[in-house]
Amino acid sequence: MPLAGLADILTEARAGGYGVAGLVVQGWEDAKSYVLAAEQAECPVILQAGPGARAHTPLPVLGRIFAELANSAAVPVASHLDHAKGLDEIKQALECGFSSVMIDGSEMRLAENIELTCRAAELARLAGASVEAELGFVGYAEGAASVMTDPQEAGQFVAETGVDALAVSVGNTHLQTGKQAVIDSGRLAEIAAATANCALVLHGGSGIAAPLRARLAAERLVTKFNIGTELRQVFGAGLRRYLAANPGSFDRVEILSGLMPDMITECRAILAGLRPDRTAPDAQAKKLRSTSQ
């Protein structure tokens, strides 16, 4: 089916009390694995082109990959530009056919962030695309510290920009390799109340325990969870196992194709864990669902 709009996916998910994963893509094999996993879990999925992927692969190439996968998928697939710092990146992504863009003015003052986001939202609307922004600052493990999102500012921000989704900082952190995030549920509830019908997003979803992700979605506090590190860890572990078991392998396609089954299995469990309303397709996802209740 054609690329889906982020706003449509998130509106349906929020109404249904389930979460959607924004999955960080770094190449064809993981993007293909994520879509196959979404089909098996019968879930929509968001394929994301972050700064790291864009530095390695030109944005037009990523856009064509995402569109190709969406066209052949049996579930809704959105293509999302993640963490764009300026309008030039937004314009390029829209020209490349992305169905969603994120403008990141999180390090700016409130008024400047609002102004930049309004300009990005105008461009996105003209192209028929959705827009996400960030308020507060989601920090990085062993890097820049977070700045918590102010609920009152969040209400003002959404009212003035009209964004479809807002990434917030409530204890979540980028690039965590363990499930140590402690989410400030009280602050998150205040933000949700102040932002009315806007879908909330937690970047750094890999650091949030799966049962907590499911609960936050079921309570309609968070609709989109960005997940990258968790699946990159699966890729790295699988690569080491594959090469140890096949020391004579040297063909890139053979090696990367050999990693896809594990990627699909783990991704399917993540997606199913965000949808406790569905029957999970494997034992791991069933366990995630039961512990979230």
Image (tube, rainbow, N blue to C red):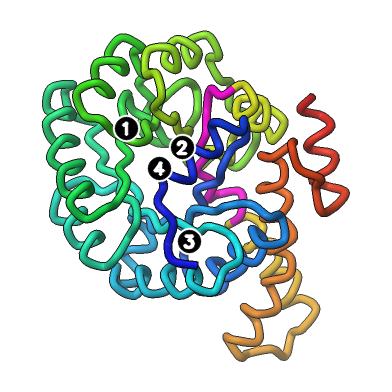
Q: Is residue 77 magenta?
A: no
- Which of discs 1 and 4 lies nearer the camera? The answer is 4
Residue at the image point whose x is 73% and y is 50% from the top? 269
Residue 134: assigned label: 1
Q: Is residue 226 magenta?
A: yes
Q: In what element is the residue under mark 4?
A: helix
Q: Label 4 is placed on what type of residue?
A: Ala
User: CB under 8 Å between callouts 2 and 4?
Assistant: no
- Rendered view: 44 above or below 204: below
Q: CA distance from mark 1 to mark 3?
A: 20 Å
Q: Label 3 is placed on what type of residue?
A: Val
Q: Label 1 is placed on what type of residue?
A: Glu
User: CB under 8 Å between callouts 1 and 3?
Assistant: no
Badge 3: residue crowd in 10 Å (few <14, some 14–19, many ≥20): many
Q: Is residue 218 left or right of residue 142?
A: right
Percent position of residue 169, x then y: 41, 24
Q: Which residues are magenta?
A: 220-231
Camera-nearest residue between 246 and 42: 42
Give the labeled residue for mark 2.
203
